[in-house]
Image (cartoon, helix red, strand yellow):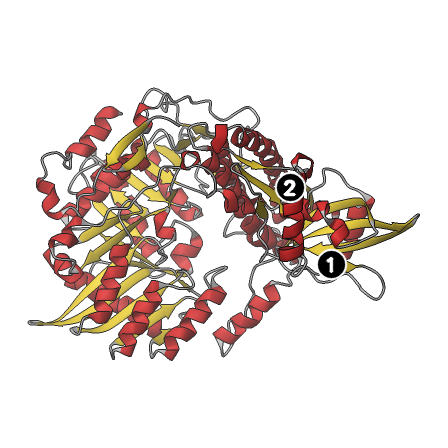
Amino acid sequence: MTDLKNGKKNQKIIDPQNMSVSTDTISETMPIPPLEIEEKYHLINRELSWLAFNERVLAEAENAHHPLLERLRFIAISASNLDEFFTVRVAGLKHLVKRGLKLDYYNSFVSPQRQLKEIDARIRHLLAQQQVILPQLFSALSAHDENGVSIVSPDQLDDADKAFVKAFIINEVIQIITPQTLDPAHPFPFISNEGRGMFLDLEESKNKHKTALIMLSPVIKRFCRLPGDKVRFISLEDAILLNLDEIFPQHELKDHVLFRVLRDSEIEYDEEAEDLVTTFENALRARRRGNVIALQLSADRPSQLIDVLADELKVSEEDQFYVGGMIDLSDLSQICSAGDDTLRFPPYSARFPERIRDFGGDCFAAIRAKDILVHHPYESFDVVLQFLRQAAEDPKVVSIRQTLYRTQPDSPIVRALISAAEQGKSVTAMVEIKARFDEEVNIRLARDLERAGVQVVYGFVDLKTHAKLSLIVRQEENGLRSYAHCGTGNYHPQKAKVYTDLSFFTCDPDICYDIVRIFNFMTSYVKPVKLNKVIFAPVTARKNFVDAVEAEIKSASEGKPSGIWIKLNSLVDHHIISVLYKASQAGVPIELVVRGICCLRPGVPGLSENIKVRSLIGQFLEHSRIYVFANGVALPSPQAKVYIASADLMPRNLDRRVEVFMPIENPTVHRQILDQVITANINDTLNSWLLQPDGRYIRHPDAASKPFSAHHFFMTNPSLSGRGSALDDPNRLSWPEASRQILKDQ
């Protein structure tokens, strides 16, 4: 990766525009087969569409235009994604089978049994591809001149290395692990979800065998770095095997297998429970003991030792997965920060909105002057933190309301809310404890907030609160004024460094009053009769979306310009898909940027020939949701209806969650989203995969001839609404000139 360009002083940015790009960077070892099509309904199966997304993630590990350690990280991401798929989606289908249900009407018209069969084949294919790509990457990394990174095997160690590893085992491992010989007095222990261990066949004396178990505690680092100038690691399991005599002296190892257990992680709770928090705490403890969904094995074939292990864990043959190599590849992320910087994407420092600097860092003054849109991660999430910190410290602020769906355990958002409460402000936190895999963190944070005097509300029993909202009320000269923040992503500072999301700040009185009533809905369960501007689920979102599509159909039928541009993470809702098919049949051109699951089939003659679907997979994870309707004028135009949202087009988002669709009316922000953000996404070639009518995804065919990366573009071009006085800088490309240049280049 040598084609670099200065995008900012003292900052190197990958410049895909200057790359010689080939469309065949994915080797023949990574074929992506067609997806199961639910022909009768013209739908792509939801679960197989998700697996196709994860195959695209894994394919980036073979993308020669990514630095080597970033390619390794894509393997780790694909492995982590697959774990969640096993423990949630596969587990859910198994629940349906167990209950004797023939169909899952929310997600598929194909029986759960048939889905599980198709899923099993795709998962085994994906696991096999991981093991094909991984040694190729290790080989390339170790051969990368003096700055390479290696994971070495025991037979590659010299005497000094072996002494170091032995000291590591004695000083850092033996004191933590609990080796266990299995016999009638020591039965096989319970192994919790994601538990990883070594199952051993040991010979104590001639013909006297015993089986033993060593569970590998997650508190021990998976890879031990060896001394020396070169960056070399040995895996924990190899280090243990090399020094097994320190754990089982006078025993000979006859056979062994490394294994990992994945259990059902779905939480079942009583909707009639009197105390939802206590119910969830009990359910979380039960989740660790869920049924085994998958037993991953380092072996490549069955053996007598594995038969014993599977019998002890009560795992059927169909739930055993032989990877024939390293398991739990998500741990590879531990070594992706090692080695030379040339092995990773060049560091990127997010910009801080210049307009807030124009007002001396006063967020409220900047928002009063004009609505602001912040585009993460290209622009810093610090502006969101500063907004809340300023609210906490400002004596004129009288109240703060905040939703919390996902955030980090030591959240600066929570600290700001606690500080505000301790200073006597009225603070309300809407904490969603049903956020999957963040339930424990959210319960702990909620209790911290309550101790500080924050009014904590846990939301609905039957709905998830997924909206991302802050509302601050300030006493000013002319009375109370409200300031709102609406985001497409979570209040999570670390994820905001790699997730592409939008943060919208406004003091529009109509919008702020709508948000007040949405917060009141979340705390009192009383539905607002009518809102001024904001659309929200589960009350008005579905109808408003359908009405907007119908308006485009009407325009097309009358010979007027029409069009729909949507960017989101998942498109699953069958009713919404049928409405989009209807729009395509009426001649409405539709551009969809769908990162992950897409059940819609584009390009089918007579059904969806006017719909194009692309998926962007690259340096950053696409997460923002944008909805654009032409409104009688050819796109892009100032007359288009533009919304940003917390919601994807899934039944759960539209019917079973509290979500917000925020209308964008400020001309500057409107141009930024329409002419900049979504235009760049629609015209991306280097990160894009195009969905075919048969469910296959192919890399964009213009990647070589018309290379354009939306990620690189946003890293090297400042946004519009946050620029302030910098708009007058003659050396910077202005909008809409930049958006016109995008279209011209295509």
x, y percentage for residue 125?
61, 35
Q: Amino acid at mark 1?
A: Pro
Q: Position of residue 664 (x, y in %)?
A: 20, 51
Mark 1, residue position = 179
The spot of residue 488 in percent (x, y) is: 32, 53
Q: Is residue 295 visible?
A: no
Q: Which of the two labelled residues, at mark 2 and mark 1, occupies the earlier sequence position?
A: 2
Residue pointed to by mark 2: 160
- Of residues 140 and 680, the one nearer the viewer is 140
Disc 2 residue crowd, few under 14, some 14–19, many 20+, Cα 10 Å: few
- Badge number at residue 208: none
Does residue 76 appear left or right of residue 478 in this picture? right
**Quadrant of the image for the N terminus?**
top left
In terms of secondary structure, where does tag 2 sit?
A: helix
For the point 28% across and 46% down, which residue is it?
350
Does residue 548 lie above or below 264 as drawn?
A: above
| Residue occupying the far front of the picture | 160
Horizontal side of residue 743 vs 204, given as left or right: left
Q: Residue at x 46, y 41 (%)?
A: 599
Q: CA distance from mark 2 to mark 1?
A: 27 Å
Helix or strand or loop: what does disc 1 sit on?
Answer: loop
